[in-house]
Image (cartoon, helix red, strand yellow):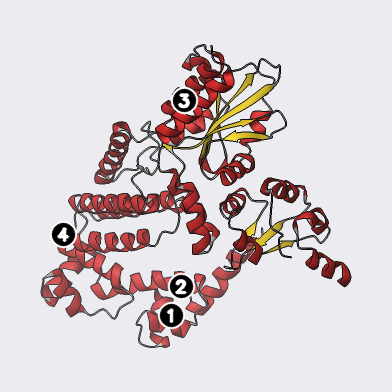
Amino acid sequence: MQDVENRLLILAGQIYAACRLGAWCFDEEKHLFISTAPHREEYHMFLQSGGCLQMAIDRKDEPGIPYIMNGKLGLAWIAEWVHLQSGSRLLVVLGPVYLKNTPIDYSLQRLDMQGISQFLRRQYLNVLGDVPVLSFDMLRQYACILHYTCYQENVSPISLQADALESEREIREADRMPDQNDYQRMAAYEDMLLYHLAKGTKPEKGSNNYKGELQDFGLGDSLRQIKNNLIIFTGLCAQTVVKSGVPLYTAKMMENEWVYRIENLHGFSAAGKLREEMYDAFLDQVCRQRDDAGQSWAVCECRNYIQMNYMKELTLEEIAQHCGYTEYYLSRKFAKETGSKLNEYIHQVRIDAAKIMLLTTSKEVQEISEDLHFGNRNHFDRVFRKRVGISPARFREQRGKMENIGEET
Amino acid sequence: MRLRRLENYLDFMEAVQSCESDVYFNSCEGDHLNLKSVLSQFLFASICSDHDFLEQGSVECKKSEDYGRLRDFLCEKDIEMCDGAD
């Protein structure tokens, strides 16, 4: 029977030939005897800096059973202590290995955040480029082979799992490739959201087992993929609200606005929030449309057009042209259905906007008046006073004070 | 301070770990690696066999006492100049 050292040498050669997986032998003092890995110095530092070498050393008193370590920055290693006939102990390590699910992407993201030079980036990627990529199951098989080589006995995968480090769950999670269920769950979740959107009702939280995480299906550029998913979902929302009665123009404007915001996303963390905001905006639009029930399409379109364009110099001619009616017919129809004149409605929308601008910006009243096309300050004051009861300056003073008191308390 | 030709990188990294404060490696390409961070350690590892590149860079300790801990890995001339300045 061959001694364990010879068997390990054969194993080291075989696994390197099979998938360039390196084998390492250390003594109890962390001294390296032999390594078959490429980039030996670099990988040795990875093993040490990632904390896995110490992790393995700490387990030297545990009975011989292989375990898988998930080191920092996504590199995994297999380790097992071997009792030699001489009475000393030998630590055998196989690795490094990247588990599946685009770990190189993760490394690249970290590199981008670090802002390093092209030279260093190239060197680093050259070194990482030789790290084999294996599935977790494959890694477990190598662990079983290692154990057999050391002790000539089989180890059951179950006992291997039980003895694996706490980080095993993380490893398994990272190793998990997206399956059909992920797509189905996400599609079902979006269907549920669209169903509620069409009805104008807010979906209950937790009404679906799936929490609606934005999925990265591991196809490459994760952020791009999430943006694409969001853009598609925005398009679906826009289509749904049109079917629920929201004018096509309004839906398209909203869609364009949200696509623009999605394209400007810079991180994953903001993506979930943006999707919620986008969904709520479409839902609000449907609800507003429901409130306007009983009004003709032309009047709804007219109101929406005014709401979207009140910062422009609106003319009756332009609005009528947009709605496809004559000025005379549209103004009569609007007054009949809403009970107020078109001009008054435009004033109302602009005064609502002015209130917000007065409280949230430091613009002069004159400037706000000009932004909202009131012509001159006197006219703005008069219209504002008529609708709010006080002048714009007084409104800013009073409400500003109230907000300050609110903040102080 | 410039690095000497490193014979054993792991010893150098262990010495860095023993430093009280952050230790940076500034490369000639403008990289600024905090050798206490794992990613930077990995990046540093990937250039550890490029002796010329390492020798063109410099090591910077946030606390001047830490230079003493790295004395064995730094250029003697630089240490002498630093000691002389003190």
Question: Label 3 vs label 1: CA separation?
Answer: 72 Å
Element under label 3? helix
Which one is in front in this view, the residue at disc 3 or the one at disc 1?
3
Q: Is residue A222 above or below residue A295?
A: above
Which one is in front in this view, the residue at disc 4 or the one at disc 3?
3
Question: Label 3 vs label 2: CA separation?
Answer: 66 Å
Residue behind mark 3: A142
Q: Is residue A7 left or right of residue A182?
A: right
* Residue at 73% across, 51% down: B16
Which one is in front in this view, the residue at disc 2 or the one at disc 4?
2
Q: Where is residue B35 in the image (x, y as percent from the top left)?
A: 66, 54
Q: Looking at the picture, which amino acid does disc 2 mark?
A: Met
Element under label 4? loop
Residue behind mark 1: A368
Task: State which tag comes first along the sequence, 2 or 1.
Answer: 2
Q: In this view, does A235 lie to the left or right of A49?
A: left
Element under label 2? helix
Residue behind mark 2: A357
Res A159 visible: yes
Q: In this view, does A257 lie above or below A17?
A: below
Task: State which tag comes first along the sequence, 3 or 2.
Answer: 3
Q: Which chain carries label 1?
A: A
Res. A341 image quadrant: bottom left
Question: Label 2 vs label 4: CA separation?
Answer: 31 Å
- Circle 1 crowding by C-alpha within 10 Å: few under 14, some 14–19, many from 20: many
Residue behind mark 4: A296
Q: Where is residue B67 in the image (x, y as percent from the top left)?
A: 80, 59
Question: Label 1 vs label 4: CA separation?
Answer: 33 Å
Question: Label 4 vs label 3: CA separation?
Answer: 71 Å
Q: In this view, does A145 lie to the left or right of A404?
A: left
